[in-house]
Amino acid sequence: MVADPAIRQIRIASYNIHAWRGTDGQHAPERIMDVIDSLHADILALQEVVSPRRMGLPCSMADMASGHGYHVTFGRTMLREDSQYGNALLSRRGPTDVHRHDISVPGREPRGAVEAFFSYGGLTLKVICTHLGLRQRERASQLDALLSLATTENADATILMGDFNNWFGLSREHRLLRRQFGPQPAVRTFPSYFPLFGLDKILISPGSLQTSLAAVNTPAARKASDHLPILSTLEIR
């Protein structure tokens, strides 16, 4: 692993933005973007993103994020008459390669994952952002597909992150994640006004590269969405 000596740490974040709607019921994209700015993340996974796709409507996710210095890789899971819905990967630098995966289960809400590769000097990062389903059997199928992607065979480090919709620490899903990524601290992110459940995760392999992991529990974050953002630091050694 040969890394750019000028880059020592990479800040990684994941955030379910609840279709821009805050805990006060207001649709306020600028509030979400203020929270995103406060994270100072180099790579950021967003879930429940609604992005307009017609002229005359509020600016798209790409327009909004570019104004904050981010490149946007969108992973659409649903197409509506006036907008697209799904996951988005924001990054300070553009990816070198992108793959979009359909991990939907028949009869359930469409789900997807964005797999992107980034180069930091000689270091190749594989980043996968996703949003799993609400039912256990649905998540089990989706997680099997994701773990087959989340290997380090074609990257120096792999990051799997998003809203996993699972708070039961003894579940099969958690056992599989621990087997592949090692022990993970439980970080409570939902509901944002009084977080009880660790639905949102950032998993890094090799685990020794992850030096911090915490929810961002600020007054602004508690109001902007029903999830708190989760923030991690990856150290390049």
Image (cartoon, rainbow, N blue to C red):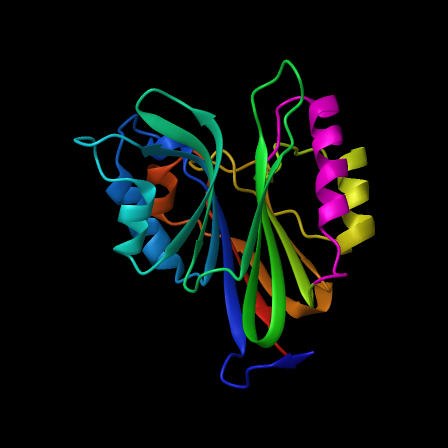
Q: Is residue 83 visible?
A: yes
Horizontal side of 96 relative to 154 (left or right) equals: left
* Residue name at image x 45 percent, y 63 percent: 42
| Residue 146 lies in the magenta-colored region | yes
Residue found at x 33% / y 47%: 62
Residue shown at the point (33%, 31%) measured from the top left: 21
Above or below, comparing residue 222 to residue 94 in the picture: above
Q: Position of residue 142 (x, y in %)?
A: 70, 32
Position of residue 176 relative to residue 10, above or below, is above
The image shows residue 186 at horizontal and vertical percentages of 65, 47
Query: Is residue 85 shown left or right of residue 114?
Result: left
Judged left or right of residue 205, residue 118 is left
The quarter of the picture where residue 82 lies is: top left
Q: Residue furthest left?
A: 56
Q: Position of residue 145 (x, y in %)?
A: 73, 38
Magenta stretch: give its range: 131-154
Q: Position of residue 153 (x, y in %)?
A: 77, 61
What residue is shown at x 59% (from left), y 40% (from top)? 113
Res 162 seen here: no
Is 90 above or below relative to 169? below
Count all numbered tags in the image, as a single digit: 0
Quadrant showing the C terminus: bottom right
Q: Quadrant of residue 137?
A: top right
